[in-house]
Amino acid sequence: MCGIAGEIRFDGRSADPGAVARITDAMHRRGPDGTGVHSAGPIALGHRRLKIIDLSERGSQPMVDPALGLAVVFNGCIYNYKELRSELEAAGYRFFSDSDTETVLKAYAHWGAACVEHFLGMFAFALAERDTGTLVLGRDRLGIKPLYLAEGPGRLRFASSLPALLAGGEVDTSIDPVALHHYMTFHSVVPAPRTILSGIRKLPPATVRTINADGTSSDHVYWTPVHSRRSEFAGMGAEEWKERTLDALRLAVRRRMVADVPVGVLLSGGLDSSLIVALLAEEGQTALKTFSVGFHAAGGEKGDEFEYSDLVAKEFSTDHEQILVDPARMLPAVDDTISAMAEPMVSHDCVAFYLLSEQVAKSVTVVQSGQGADEVFAGYDWYPPLARTPRSKAVETYAGVFTDRPHSDMADILEKEWLLDHDPSRAFIAEHFAAEGADETLDAALRLDSTVMLVDDPVKRVDNMTMAWGLEARVPFLDHELVELAAACPPEFKLAHGGKGVLKEAARGVVPDGVIDRPKGYFPVPAIRHLEGPFLERVRDAVTDPVAKARGLVRSEWLDRMLADPNTQRTNLGSNALWQVALLEMWLQERGI
């Protein structure tokens, strides 16, 4: 887990190693264990290292192989790197390190851009060919690892973090109106390739981009999950689906044990993280370190779920740390969390993950986390209505249960210059629902949520908040083979027992029944859900700042109503409407935009 950066020029000039160094240095929290820049002609590569595999200096990056004429920077982990290494050694390649990064380099030399199809893991990489001047960018199937891009006159820059690109300079920081519409519709999700800033884009998941020396480029999408019934699973009943699911999850958890440092678990006390703990115990993990976070109650809302995490910790005899956040730390943590965001993210869970990660990083460098199970196995309450919806009404129904607000409501919130005469968010949903490979309405919704909405909300949230403390988070529920299996599972098995039915059945006898049958929970952060006192004043300061007024995103009439009554108006999914607007403004101000 690291931070990568670089520049390629198309105008005959050499790359600017100084700019790449600034971009790289801006990601020091992602990789506190080392740094490096490699520059050769039109391409420069930068890297911040977090030591997970091969702790020696032989694993340092940028990694250059003069014999092959290749240089690479890599972020993430290839879980099957040892198996691939053996295969590549049999093909005649010789290795000088024990790192998974070198496996990426040799795999590209052997298979070309198709190397990604051999990787089991999470990754973003940039690989430069010395002799052709070609740069190849790649991102993992589920977009667990980020990769941002900024075009400029005669050049392209890239980095693991959007703010890092700002440190390189010469970026168009104007607001993208379509991205703003997405932000206000999809609870801050801006699907790739857009970001909230016009001058920065992101490489979509499951994509390899080959950039030629003359600036031309081509994309190859190498993986698309098929959300339909498959012949090899025909006739399978609930019992066999349960067994297949448990076996696939066991394998996913086992793969993510690969490390040269201890691996812990972020234990919320929910089904998903509890299953991970149980399966790690099955694998023989003893004295497993587990961590839970809680907050003091506010607005009549409970702030912790310790009773469930304690139950799991006791059942599996983990070395458990219960972290109760002092209320005095909350307000400063809000600004620190915003500073850690690569893009503005409205979920109050961000603060929970940030504060949790701060403490966890004092004990371990790698954790497994339960993110993704709800989107993969249909755990949210908006999925059952979709299962009863014909495809002809799918887009309308999905928009009604999932989006923050209809397009028509934008006129009440945004200033006139930011209003669009069309609804790009509804069009985005319609385009995805119309694509082949999803049999039923629920299939199409799960495909959109697991390949788009999940990537730029929960997954990005975990990456940003853990990496702010040099902590690597691994997500077994986003093992692509498990995702493929779940995509083929008939909807009725996923929707059973109030959602995630097949997963709950797989958990019987593995985790305590009290965890399986509990009401669905989440990381509660009551102080942000119910804005009052110093938190409301922080919001007021941001949205009434002269910078905010000059930006002119939000109508003053709407803002006055919200500040007078900050906790009544909620989005369709129950989020605080004022917080959504304020978070964007605070993020922009934090970036000096």
Image: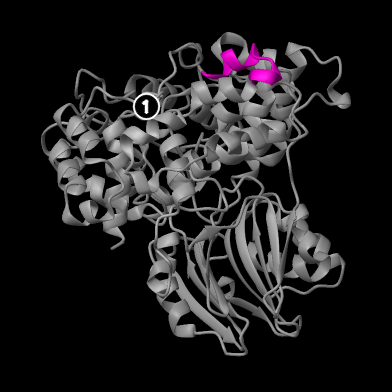
How dense is the environment of label 1, judged by Cα within 10 Å: few (below 14), some, or many (20 and up)? some
Q: Is residue 201 above or below residue 367?
A: below
Residue 135 lies, in percent from the top left, at: 67, 73
Magenta segment's dominant SS is: helix
User: At 22% across and 25% down in the image, what residue appears?
Assistant: 567
By what rule are the colours in the image chosen? one colour
Question: Residue 300 occupies which quadrant of the picture?
Answer: top left
Residue 387 shown in magenta: yes
Q: Nearer the viewer, residue 37 or 56?
A: 37
Q: Nearer the viewer, residue 206 or 176?
A: 176
Classify mark 1: helix, strand or loop: loop
Asked if residue 576 shows in the view, the reply is: yes
Asked if residue 27 shows in the view, the reply is: no
Q: Is residue 219 above or below residue 495?
A: below
User: At 41% across and 43% down in the image, what residue appears?
Assistant: 419
Residue 316 lies, in percent from the top left, at: 48, 26
User: At 48% across and 53% down in the image, what residue appears?
Assistant: 195
Residue 308 lies, in percent from the top left, at: 39, 20
Query: Does 131 sit left or right of 56 as displayed?
Result: right
The quadrant in which the C terminus is found is bottom left
Q: Which residues are magenta?
A: 382-393
Identify the amino acid type marked 1: Thr
Residue 12 lies, in percent from the top left, at: 62, 90
Give the labeled residue for mark 1.
571
Q: Nearer the viewer, residue 574 or 107?
A: 574
Q: Is residue 496 above or below residue 314?
A: above
Q: Is residue 26 above or below residue 510?
A: below
Question: Residue 260 occupies which quadrant of the picture?
Answer: bottom right
